[in-house]
Amino acid sequence: MSDHNWGDQGANHRPDPTWDLDPQTLAVRGGLSRTGFGETSEALFLNSGFTYASAEQAEASFAEEIDHFLYSRFHNPTVSMFENRLAALEGAERCLGTSSGMSAMFMSIACMVSAGDRIVASAAMFSSCHVVLTEILPKWGITVELVKSDNHEGWKNALSQPTKVVFIETPSNPLLEITDIKFVSDLAHKVGATVVVDNVMASVVLQKPLELGADVVMYSTTKHIDGQGRVLGGAILGSEEYFTNYLLPFNRHTGPTMSAFNAWVLVKSLETLNMRVNQMVDSAQAIAEFLDAHPKIELVRHPGLKSHPHHALAMTQMSGKGGSMIGFEVKGGKSAAFELMNKLRVIDISNNLGDSKSLITHPASSTHRRLSPEVQAEMGIHAGTLRLSVGLEAAADLVKDLQQALA
Ligand SMILES: *Cc1c(COP(=O)(O)O)cnc(C)c1O
């Protein structure tokens, strides 16, 4: 048999851009770019560099006169497929894949700020984001003010003076406080701020911050996007202008790049994201209702419950669904919380979230232990607080597991 032809053997046809495809079609087809071999699935390009047909082509590539991959720190065909697919789902002009959610969070802000600038952020958040904002950036002469998510007067006061960046995590980790993205974005734009939303907890399936007025969205793709506990990754989405003026130069020279292998896992994960998240969210609603009615539970925080202080806002901002996470407090403090965790037989003890496996964590002693007791209390984290990430097991089995552990 002769060598296979390296020419254009496969299908690379695309629907017309005016077709206005459904998100589920975009999740499977968005960003798809086939090589001349016509492979069905997205190809994995595990190469760091690229070659040029001539010195002139190399020169024109670096001058950006022609579109040619240069080096995998800047871009890579597999990573580009992931980025273009997520951008299509989010409705964003551009997307950049990063090595982790934290590199996405850090870079989305660091690329914009200089000494003397001011940042305003929602107070309850993932603890590493809190460390970046309150410990790392202030070392470089940046001031940061935190506002409680539902304190509208607080947001008005904080955003009555020039501000460079507003950072919002909603729902917040672990107690699922909701910040009004539209309200805060409108205030932020009046003082010239760029609004960055950490959309990890809701995911693109439930919440579209750009449609609500935010400028930039960031993800830990480690969570629902991979959703199967395999690879770390992050993503930043925003406008062409933000990318050209701030993000791309910062990324190019500092290098928190997504690996091509991780992008290959993640581009395939996007195909099933919608189904997985919807199943998790439906189960989480049922489990939150079960916990809410249980006599040994002090309090349940789930945006889908009417008892949640920001339920109405969550329902309009998050496509009418509460998300896959539940914060709850067991009567009897730390020992009762630990006893419950230790008795579980299906749900695993793990600090990850958004996984196909249901995972439970005790924030005060794990994910949020780095924060002082005062800051923890401000975020609503107490000794008996637990965070449950609902996975893809049957909801009835998860309820059964919690029921026997609480008996
Ligand atoms: C996990 C998480 C991050 C950080 O993501 P990594 O991929 O672990 O670096 C940031 N924000 C939120 C809300 C998260 O849950």
Image: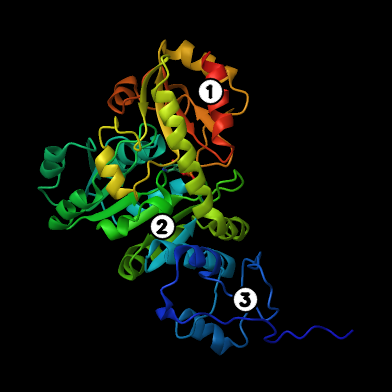
Q: Which residue is mark 3?
A: 34
* Residue at 51 percent of width and 84 percent of height: 59
Q: Nearer the viewer, mark 3 or mark 2?
A: 3
Identify the mark at residue 296; answer none if there is no mark: none
Circle 3: is it few (<14), some (14-19), or many (20+) Cα within 10 Å?
A: many
- Which of the two labelled residues, at mark 3 and mark 2, occupies the earlier sequence position? 3
Q: Residue furthest right?
A: 1
**At label 3, which amino acid type do we have?**
Arg
Q: Is residue 375 above or below residue 16?
A: above
In the image, the residue with mark 3 has its CB under 8 Å from the nearest atom of ligand 1: no
In the image, the residue with mark 1 has its CB under 8 Å from the nearest atom of ligand 1: no
Q: Quadrant location of residue 382?
A: top left
**Going by the image, does 115 lie left or right of 96?**
left
* Residue at 31 percent of width and 28 percent of height: 379
Residue toward you, 227 or 55: 227
**Going by the image, does 195 lie left or right of 125?**
left
Q: Is residue 349 visible?
A: no
Q: Is residue 88 above or below residue 176?
A: below
Q: Is residue 9 visible?
A: yes
- Which of the two labelled residues, at mark 1 and mark 2, occupies the earlier sequence position? 2
Instruction: Look at the numbered discs 3 and 1 and tell me whether their residues touch, using CB distance below 8 Å.
Output: no
**At label 1, which amino acid type do we have?**
Leu
- Position of residue 42 measured from the top left corner of the image (x, y, whole percent): 63, 67
State the separation of the CA atoms marked 1 and 2. Answer: 36 Å
* Residue at 47 percent of width and 12 percent of height: 336
Q: Which residue is mark 2?
A: 236
- Which of the two labelled residues, at mark 3 and mark 1, occupies the earlier sequence position? 3
State the separation of the CA atoms marked 3 and 1. Answer: 46 Å
Q: Which residue is mark 1?
A: 402
